[in-house]
Amino acid sequence: MPYYLRLQGPNQWPSDATCPDFRPAVETFAVEMEEEARRLTGALAEVLGDNSDVWDRFFDDPFVQMKICRYPGLESADAGVSGVGAHSDSGFLSMLVQDDAGGLQAQLPNGDWVDVPPIKHAIVVNLGEVLQVMSGGKLRATVHRVQRTQRNRISVPYFWNPRLETTLADLGVSTGDASTSSGTHGGRNEVFLEYGANAFKSLARSHPRVMDRHHPDLCVVDGRVMVANAAR
Ligand SMILES: O=C(O)CCC(=O)C(=O)O
Ligand SMILES: [Fe+2]
């Protein structure tokens, strides 16, 4: 089994006793986000001059991740080092809802950072690396980051991706294509052949302690995740 299939697993829900409304609310939200993600996928294909259903086959069995993040603010008793460093998301597109604390920024092509201000009822859409590849580089993955905020910040990113086993060849892209690298991480961000490997790259890069604790058999060499035995 490819190591990246470990990204799939059961959801972890708080108990009904402590949070009875949580699960149904999140499940309803996820269904609505999926509808919107499918609509956006079609609209993006049309932007590129294709039929809106041209990418549908990659999303028969999509790989979806969603998380509810709390970033302790500087005022908070548990303020530590929080925020998210500059990166692009590894998948197709990400849609996120944020509260009114602020902190999210996107990078312009000239390198400047701009705030992505919270707008009530608006969803922020970040284009991902897989979309960059699928569009032949016409659509660039959005480089973004989260700065520390004064107050606590809550955000809910929803990541919309093809199934983990999708390869660049499935997408009709050849290796070495210019769209398969992006300017993040000092220009050393390669978009990997299999989407699952690309997705795991993000986990390994952003969450080293998760890697140490839950994936001690994996190591990261030149941004590439490897099974430790195979790396030697
Ligand atoms: O919390 C946010 O607003 C963004 C988080 C993010 O960029 C990510 O998890 O990839
Ligand atoms: Fe992100």
Image (cartoon, rainbow, N blue to C red):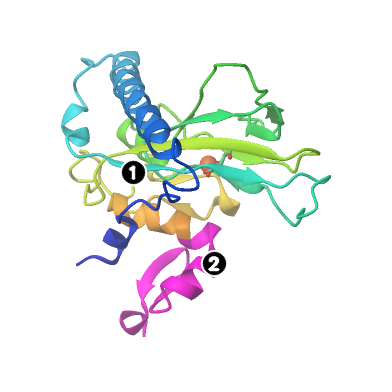
Q: Is residue 222 magenta?
A: yes
Quick check: marks 1 and 2 in contact, CB under 8 Å? no
Other residues around mark 1 within 10 Å, as few (<14) / some (14–19) / many (≥20): few
Residue 179 in view of the camera: yes
Q: Is residue 217 magenta?
A: yes
Q: Tell me which segment is drawn in magenta.
A: 204-232
Does residue 203 sit above or below 226 in this rendering?
A: above
Q: Quadrant of residue 229?
A: bottom left
Report the front residue among 157 and 125: 157
Beta carbon at label 1 within 8 Å of ligand 2: no
Residue 111 in view of the camera: no
Where's the N terminus, which quadrant? Answer: bottom left
User: Residue beneath label 2, please?
Assistant: 208
Does residue 173 sit above or below 35 in this rendering?
A: below
Q: Residue at x 31, y 22 (%)?
A: 35
Q: Residue at x 43, y 36 (%)?
A: 158
Where residue 69 appears, as percent x and y from the top left, is: 57, 44
Q: Residue at x 51, y 22 (%)?
A: 123
Residue 177: assigned label: 1
